[in-house]
Amino acid sequence: MRATALAVALALLVAAPLQAAQPTRIDQPSLDRAAALRTQALADPTAWQVLESLTTEVGPRMAGSEADARAVEWARAKFKALGYDRVWTEPVTFPKWERRSEAARVLGAHAQPLRVTALGGSPAGTVEGEVVRFADLAALQAAPDGSLAGKIAFVDYPMQARADGSDYRNGGGIRWAGPSLAVHKGAIGFLMRSAGTDTSRAAHTGGTRFEEGLKPIPAAALSTIDAAQLARLAALGPTRVQLALDCGWDGQYTSQNVIGEITGSKRPQEIVLIGGHLDSWDLGTGAIDDGAGIAITMATGALLKPLKPARSIRVVAFANEEQGLWGGRAYMQKHAGDVGKHIIAVESDFGADHIYGFDSSARDLQPAALAQIQQVLAPLGISWMPGKGEPESDIGPLTERGMAWAWLGHDGTRYFDLHHNAEDTLDKINPQSLAQNTAAYAVFTWLAAQADGDFGSAPKPPSAGK
Amino acid sequence: MRATALAVALALLVAAPLQAAQPTRIDQPSLDRAAALRTQALADPTAWQVLESLTTEVGPRMAGSEADARAVEWARAKFKALGYDRVWTEPVTFPKWERRSEAARVLGAHAQPLRVTALGGSPAGTVEGEVVRFADLAALQAAPDGSLAGKIAFVDYPMQARADGSDYRNGGGIRWAGPSLAVHKGAIGFLMRSAGTDTSRAAHTGGTRFEEGLKPIPAAALSTIDAAQLARLAALGPTRVQLALDCGWDGQYTSQNVIGEITGSKRPQEIVLIGGHLDSWDLGTGAIDDGAGIAITMATGALLKPLKPARSIRVVAFANEEQGLWGGRAYMQKHAGDVGKHIIAVESDFGADHIYGFDSSARDLQPAALAQIQQVLAPLGISWMPGKGEPESDIGPLTERGMAWAWLGHDGTRYFDLHHNAEDTLDKINPQSLAQNTAAYAVFTWLAAQADGDFGSAPKPPSAGK
């Protein structure tokens, strides 16, 4: 088996470069300009100014809230103020979820409040019941159906901090799948330890969905500290909790993807797409998630405009990523026929800490051009990490339809301390790291716009079940 | 002038030892036993167990709340479980203040919520007005009377972290004096940047008092992050805020000082008094303030009991320190006639980080005995710091009536990150530091109980105006 795997790997190594009939290359003047741009971007205040403006003047901007509309107007005005050549919006319609109030408390001899936040998608409701603790989703899964009748399921998984954020698979997985699973077991309510790596009282919200046909139950996340407290109390004996949520769905809302474009000087119909998402959860001011992505990519376009890039630079401030990639899916639906014109895309939606890795879907197809780009990224402390990356959030739907992508990977060790909670605020951004991020995005975007040749974008039919 | 001051200082140096007709000394067996006790205490789990029990099983325990009574019962039971010879309570009556709800938000074009907490003593009320920012209390003081009519005063002083916590003079001073000052200027509401050194969304509560005859106004603290946000918004232009507090005074409540005593084997009528305060604010679970003090001193008594100390060890879990030293004042009123029997007192009410300094009111009177104690404390990393210390909180009233005191000073660099806010929870305690604290208190208490001679406790009349 090992010999066979090795043979396959060797065959791929040999075959991959052969697929590229026309090796894409970048000319020396463009490479030289990229090195100067890198230096310029490290000292440029635009990204910080954009981020401060968004997080201060708009503040929290949950999809469908009053601030959603203000964020759209803010983005439109900011693109114009930054000198973008074209600014427009494209509608994105989705169901609106509202948070009105949320509380939980231990009842009885150890009565005390618990800090919780409703999961996005939770229904309203007040339930009281004994808490049954599970160490992880598998333990809840193993409980017999109906065994939690009249009780509140409590999944107490402590998410681990990692640079690549990979344990979000577990933490986020509990949030998405846990509530439905709890309904199957008969539970009247769902509590989870926040999908977060901090030790603070700030509970982490985030989306959940109930399976079709299930009757939804109130579902909330405890802060990591309150989860530890509840675990200690449950270890002392039967512990009853009241969970009281006022929240829920309320009709449809139409927001906008806000798009700014620097028109290409030579191949204006060809697009390098960059972006982040404009919406945030409501608890913080959305600095790391994803004001930083908006700031980094808006600043990138502004830095590139005077350089007259050959291709057009399209910056998309996507609507409603948080509640189900609505903006990214709307963009895909509108532009799936133009996949070939989207030469390559890169999103920033993983905070603003140091970018350490670079990868692309074109790693096998265009190794030479990517190596040229990597050489200019290297002085920023960025390594070529083939196979490590993936397309981030909102560009995902169009990459599934064939758009080439790049990955500029932020260090996510600290990301889930702040993700979706009240602590996601401007002060948590390191200005030096934000500048490094902007330099990386500017260098990549410039070189992708100047490259002579493509990165393999080509239409693909929708995959089954998507 | 300098020569005169030097002469006075020299005279004091010479005169001080002469005041002690009977130098107090500690015998060698007691010193040897103290060294063994130090080692034992560093490995003893009692303090951690007591702290975990209090913060978990009782949780937040604001004076006058339902949990106040549970805390009293907890303390009584815990003293008994730890084997104290005598356990009793002494009533403490005070006005009860309740927190029901609290919210603030920016109105208008930059509408967004602000995280606040009502100051203890604030009345209920909902006010809306333009915010006027002041850099500190002096700036508010300098505003003309009446100049804030219809407006909300916002004192935005950033408290500095220091090992001795000395900038609480400014931060806490704004909290106590700011609201009344704002009323004098005509303000309809009072906001302050929390008297805290963290950068989190956790606002810091704490007591305030309005001057007699003033009409109180709603008064709250913003988290340090929200204060920075409001300052940025106010810098952009006139900023209106709604502050909505439901809280206030509601009659009288009688709680209890809970007292446990290890009866002295040779001089049972003479007391070494140690303690902390049992109440906490309601936002956290009162781990550093002052569960740690309760845990350290309860564990000290338990550690000393098998050693049969010559004097009695009295551990007091004081009621309602937070809202005005009610427990400490009640103890003073009841025991002022017995000041001479209270050989010396030491309180722990400054968290559970490393103890670095030792001082005493007897520094000039009994330098030899204090030097003997310091020698046993030194291996714990504790320095003799004459003139640096003071009697902590609840023992203050009786020291003003002549009781000798000692100071075992905790490193307070981190204390005001957590003080009076939701983050004051068990996980913030370093178990190694808590053990060092307990070792220090145990060593001091044991040696004070064994000392042959006193530390200068002697009745003093109440000072004018007290």
Image (cartoon, coloured by chain):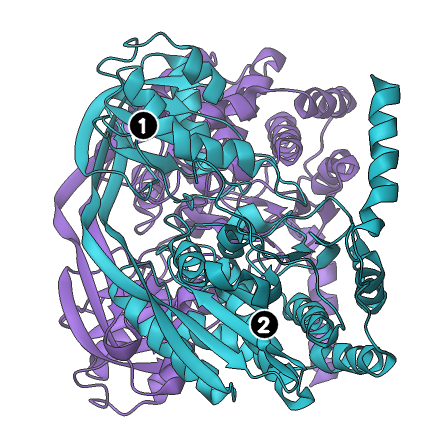
Chain colours: A cyan, B purple
User: Residue B430 occupies which quadrant of the picture?
Assistant: top right
Secondary-structure class at tag 1: strand
Q: Nearer the viewer, residue B280 or A329?
A: A329
Q: Nearer the viewer, residue A186 or B441?
A: A186
**B116 on left or right of A26:** left
Q: Which residue is mark 1?
A: A190
> x%, y% of residue B346?
53, 40
Mark 1, other Cα within 10 Å: few <14 / some 14–19 / many ≥20: many
Q: Return the disc, 1 or 2, that comes first in the chain's sequence.
A: 1
> x%, y% of residue B310?
58, 20
Q: Amino acid at mark 1?
A: Phe
Q: Chain of mark 2?
A: A
* Discs 1/2, front: 2
Classify B424 as above or below B107: above
Q: Nearer the viewer, residue B217 or B358?
A: B217
**A432 on left or right of A198:** right
Residue at the image position 35 percent from the left and 22 percent from the top? A181
Q: Amino acid at mark 2?
A: Ile
Regarding residue B137, the answer to whether it shows in the image is no
> x%, y% of residue B233?
38, 79
Classify A90 as above or below A176: below
Mark 2, other Cα within 10 Å: few <14 / some 14–19 / many ≥20: many
Image quadrant where one finds the N terminus of chain A = top right
Residue at the image position 64 percent from the left and 68 percent from the top? A434
